[in-house]
Structure formats: C-alpha cells, structure tokens
Amino acid sequence: MEVNNVELVMSAVSPTQYPTTGYPEIAFVGRSNVGKSSMTNVLINRKSYARTSSQPGKTQTLNFYQVEDQLYFVDVPGYGYAKVSKQEREKWGEMIETYLTQRETLRGVVSLVDARHEPTQDDVQMYQWLSYYDIPILILATKADKIVRGKWNKQESIIKKKLGFNKKDSFVMFSAQTKMGKDEIWKWIEDHAFG
Ligand code: GDP
C-alpha cells in the first residue's frame, strides 16, 4: 500500500474512546525497545512519526493511527518494563485484554520479537494468549540486520520452537535498517484487513 496520510487520531485507555469509523484495525505489540516504532515508521515511509521508546511512567495508551481513509494501526504500549509497579502492570493488562478480546474491527496482531534472542517469557505469554483468542498473528523478528544472514533460519527455528508457533500464523524476518520484510508485512496486513 502506498501511504501518504497517517494521523494519530486517538490515544485511548477505554473502549468509549476508540474510533467509531469502523475501519479494520491491525495492532502492534511487543516489549519495550523491541523496535515497534522503527518498524511502524518503515511501514509508513516516515523517519520519525511513531514515537520511539516510550518512557516508563508515561501514560500508557492505545494509540490509533489512521492510515489513509482505510485502516487503523493500533500501537499497543510495550510490555516488559521491569520498573513499573504491579498496579500499573495490572492496569496495562486490563486495557490490553479489553481491547484485544472485544474489538470487533481488529483483524490481526503483529507481534514483534528480537531476531537475535530466544523470545522472553512475556513474548511467549503474549503469543499463547493471542492464539487462545484465535486472533491472526504475524510474528515479526526484528533487528535481523544484527545477525548474519547464515543464522536467520536457525534463529527462526529457535523463536518458533520457544513460542510454540502454530502453522496457521505467519513469520517474517525484518530489519528497520535495511527494510527487508517490509513488503511481506504489508501483504499480510492487506490480506487480513481487507481479505
Ligand atoms: P520501541 O520501544 O519498540 O518502539 O523500539 P524503537 O523503535 O524505539 O527501537 C529501539 C532501539 O532499537 C532504537 O535504538 C532503534 O534505533 C533500534 N532498532 C529498532 N529496529 C531496529 C532494526 O531493525 N535494526 C537495528 N540495527 N536497530 C533497530
């Protein structure tokens, strides 16, 4: 998809604040610092549109980006901050759970993991949880430029094994630096949003 117009239309914490236009939605999840903002910026051909590395302690909101007059990208706040309090973590969990389980226009979730490492317990939990709710998932292994090409297949196997990857889901190796994988992500998004 050729993207010219992207606009942050809402930062929501509860369903009453979600957009009501009815466009299909694709959500992005991943632990903080995994490269979610960088990936979003590559998808929409911007250098610094999506904010990078949200600070701990900042208000955690679901950010709805309207892409053309066609769909929303929903940036789900990153998990895995060691510093947040138990109370904050619970609030985050509730907000995410409400969104992911009740949003009728949600068509799929792009779940980011670090291509270099075994997925964390949080990554595994998120994947298992999304699978349980039967939400279509694209596992995006990012920062692939940081490992040599010869290891991509091995890393893919390690990641899939740890997640308990289900064949009905999709997997893409990605780099925000080289933009490898960008077309594959867009294809998956379009298939799920409009298919
Ligand atoms: P977020 O917290 O998930 O939004 O992560 P960011 O997009 O802010 O990225 C965190 C850090 O990783 C930044 O320093 C980025 O420049 C870096 N980064 C993100 N994606 C890539 C990538 O594909 N390759 C490399 N080499 N660095 C990346």
Image (cartoon, rainbow, N blue to C red):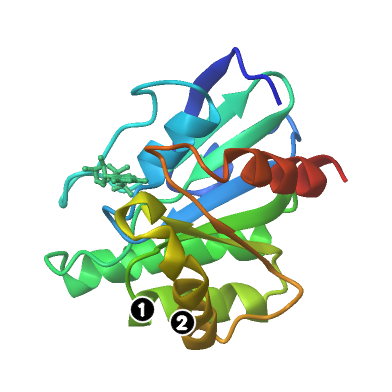
The residue tagged 1 is 118
The residue tagged 2 is 158
Q: Nearer the viewer, residue 189 or 56?
A: 189
Residue 131's x, y, as percent? 64, 77
Tag 1 secondary structure: loop
Instruction: Inspect the image, locate mark 1, and give the three-letter code of the amino acid beneath it.
Output: Glu
Q: Nearer the viewer, residue 87 or 122?
A: 122
Mark 2 closeness class: few <14, some 14–19, many ≥20 residues within 10 Å: some
Q: Is residue 16 left or right of residue 193?
A: left
Q: Which mark is residue 162?
A: none
Asked whether residue 191 is in view, the answer is: yes
Residue 64's x, y, as percent? 52, 35
Q: Is residue 89 left or right of residue 77?
A: left
As drawn, 171 above or below 57: below
Furthest residue toward top: 4
As drawn, 108 above or below 10: below
As drawn, 195 above or below 135: above
